Amino acid sequence: MSFTVAIVGRPNVGKSTLFNRLVGKKLALVDDMPGVTRDRRPGDAKLVDLRFRIIDTAGLEDAGPETLEGRMRAQTEAAIDEADLSLFVVDAKMGLTHVDKTLANMLRKRGKPVVLVANKSEAKGSDGGFYDAFTLGLGEPVPISAEHGQGMIDLRDAIVEALGEDRAFPDEDYDDVAETDIALAPTGDDDEEDEDALSLYDESKPLRVAIVGRPNAGKSTLINRFLGEDRLLTGPEAGITRDSISVEWDWRGRTIKMFDTAGMRRKARVTEKLEKLSVADALRAIRFAETVVIVFDATIPFEKQDIQIVDLVLREGRAAVLAFNKWDLVEDPQALLAELREKTERLLPQARGIRAVPIAGQTGYGLEKLMQSITDTDRVWNKRISTARLNRWLDSQTTQHPPPAVSGRRLKLKYMTQVKARPPAFMISCTRPDSVPESYLRYLTNGLRVDFDMPGVPIRIHLRAADNPFEGRKRRR
């Protein structure tokens, strides 16, 4: 992008609404309650003919540096320092407050270009607040309505004037490169095909990873440790994160795009509208990701909600890795590790062999091993197996343990092939597919995990009736 813009202002002036308007998507959570946004959220903005990077920030409030509001203020100041220009948003309907004047002084001292934006100018009685904004000494305010999209042309002109045309329109070509799935070889009859398909796994392709878990499990602290900076807001308070924030960093030359998500409590406890929006945003991050790391609190692991989150991730078809955080607080690591292994096998039978790594987000212990587990699981999630190998395997499985007889007639499994990867899904052609018991499908699923080395990823098996070559033909006399 040509330049970076930070949207700043006090709480509830419409910063996130303007952010969503400029990026063209409802990425940031919006609610009438002040202080919804807490972390700084980046996005790619488009305003008429301008293309730039934009950062949504938390509303500024006067508070001590150790408080939650003080830490939010530090995140906003970091966004201002990073940006080339700030959009200072004030509420034309409510008028100015002392916080607006404090923020204006802070922006003026930094010496960077500022565009004063008078939002909610479509409201009745907003003229007084608009003219009052002149007293801030930051030039003429731009009247807009972020909710209704009014005044966007004037905002574009103000940005160009503040930056200059050379900065606003650099001589660069921007190509929108769409993210594509990994290319997969078609199935065939050669044993070498499976190895060829695996070789197509692109280790240089960016990997999307979502970090999920219960509130206060240490998700944001973990990502900050990966980045080596306080990029995300953290603290002892539970439920700090609300938006799903994406960050990028490199690991062994590979781009990792991580999504920090809000803590997910039991559904019965989620009653407030804002928390429902946060959980829905976390679910979207899970669906968008390729690999999902479920963060457990090692001091109180395997709560009922932990197991439900893992089950949700697997039902969505994502590759899952367990991370037992706060390992530095464990008194007897060896005994706890043995207990966690036993509970993992017993409580998560649908993800037999799932990778689990003890980590400490505060100290960085185990993070390298966690990243290796993430990439190894993603490789398995993308795995394909040749049709020839699958049918030989199916023949051996049915010989060793034949399908049961239903109503006096034995079921026949005739043919098997892999129909897709991400996650691995297989189709079996058989007689009377509706009569195949679930226990036999579990037997085949566990056999696939062991014989083809596919631990910890969801495996789908679909059944369909075998084609009858004589169906539809007229009977000859």
Image: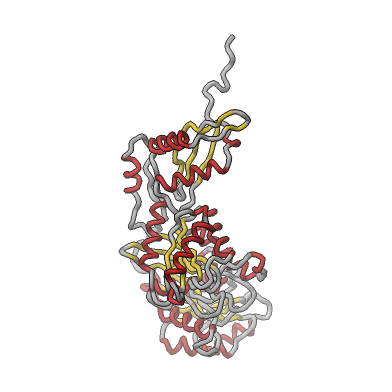
Image quadrant where residue 281 sits: bottom right
Nearest the camera: 334 or 10? 334
Residue 115 screen position, x and y as percent: 48, 80
Image x and y of residue 180, in percent: 41, 52
Screen quadrant of the N terminus: bottom left
Of residues 429 and 230, which is closer to you in this image? 429
Q: Which quadrant is home to the C terminus?
A: top right
Above-or-below relation of 471 to 420: above
Q: Nearer the viewer, residue 89 or 206?
A: 206
Which residue occupies 49% across, 67% down?
Answer: 295
> What residue is rendered at 46% in x and 56% in y?
319
Residue 455 seen in this snapshot = yes
Can residue 52 be seen in this snapshot? no
423 relative to 474, above or below: below
* Position in image of residue 235 (x %, y %): 51, 80
Q: Nearer the viewer, residue 229 or 138?
A: 229
> Residue drawn at (58%, 21%), measured in percent from left and top?
472
